[in-house]
Amino acid sequence: MSHLDVRRALPADAPAVTGVIERSIRVSAAGAYPADAVDAWASSRTVEAVREMIEATSGFVATVDQAVVGWANLDGDEVDQFYVDPDAGGQGIARRLYETIEALARANGLDQLRAVASLRAEPAFRRFGFQEVDTDQVAFNGHAFTVVRMTKRLDRPLPARPSPAGMRPAATSPALMTTRPADDDG
Ligand SMILES: CC(C)(COP(=O)(O)OP(=O)(O)OC[C@H]1O[C@@H](n2cnc3c(N)ncnc32)[C@H](O)[C@@H]1OP(=O)(O)O)[C@@H](O)C(=O)NCCC(=O)NCCS
């Protein structure tokens, strides 16, 4: 039985996190933007830059049987990084990462979170209770990307999943057991 966990990211996770970022963009975000823009986005991060992000922000990795399959972080009041390996996609891993980040934000006393969501991630943020502020074009690595600026007030709870017995793994899933991290380990 596979075991899903979410824990604080460590500098030693940087190579694995870099791989997750690149694969998730190349596979999961393919189609959200033109192919040359996806390529520029996917190849934009070095292991060293990722290590610096891990050291400078509150980052978390999702692991399945200790292999890194997802990465997200909280930078101030912004959910900045948000990537799940395509082989592990559609199983609720982004939700688990987000729950951890929202718990940390609440523990830090934040009353609002921000995100600049890719067109691929915007539906997930919406599911987590974020609302669109506006859309924008941002320049990155020589390409223009349409993004959705979103915010979420933290004075209401995280919307639940639609169906507890649905396709996505909860702690009761026979395929993917989960361990919840402490809320205040930031
Ligand atoms: C966006 C991404 C992180 C989602 O990861 P994931 O583990 O597959 O997402 P989950 O399975 O946890 O789904 C989270 C929620 O979003 C919803 N969702 C995800 N993708 C969706 C889509 N394309 N359309 C509608 N809803 C979607 C799910 O139904 C789920 O809702 P629920 O928790 O209420 O059931 C992943 O696809 C990814 O890494 N994409 C490429 C990189 C990217 O764009 N990152 C964001 C940078 S801002």
Image (tube, rainbow, N blue to C red):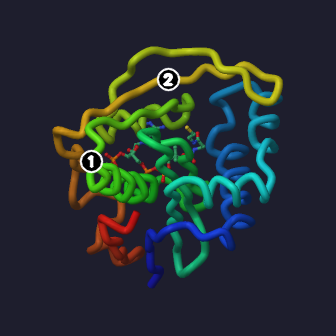
- Residue count near mark 1 (Cα–Cα under 10 Å), binned few <14, some 14–19, many ≥20: few
Secondary structure at numbered mark 2: strand
Would you identify the image quadrant in which residue 181 lies? Answer: bottom left
x then y, percent, for residue 157? 18, 45
Mark sitting on residue 21? none
Q: Tell me which residue sits at (31%, 33%) in the image.
A: 152
**Which residue corresponds to mark 2?**
148
Tell which residue pokes out farthest to the bottom in this image. Answer: 1
Q: CA distance from mark 1 to mark 2?
A: 25 Å
- Residue under label 1, please give it: 109
Q: Earlier in the sequence, mark 1 or mark 2?
A: 1
Q: Are there few (<14), some (14-19), or many (20+) residues within 10 Å of tag 2?
A: many
The amino acid on which the numbered mark 2 sits, given as a three-letter code, is Val
The image quadrant where one finds the N terminus is bottom left
Residue at screen point 54% across, 53% down: 57
- Residue type at the position of mark 1: Gly
Confirm if mark 2 falls within 8 A of ligand 1: no
**Residue at 81% over, 37% down:** 39
Question: Which of the 4 image quadrants contains residue 44?
Answer: top right
| SS label for mark 1 | loop
Along the viewing direction, whichever of 28 and 134 lies nearer the viewer: 134
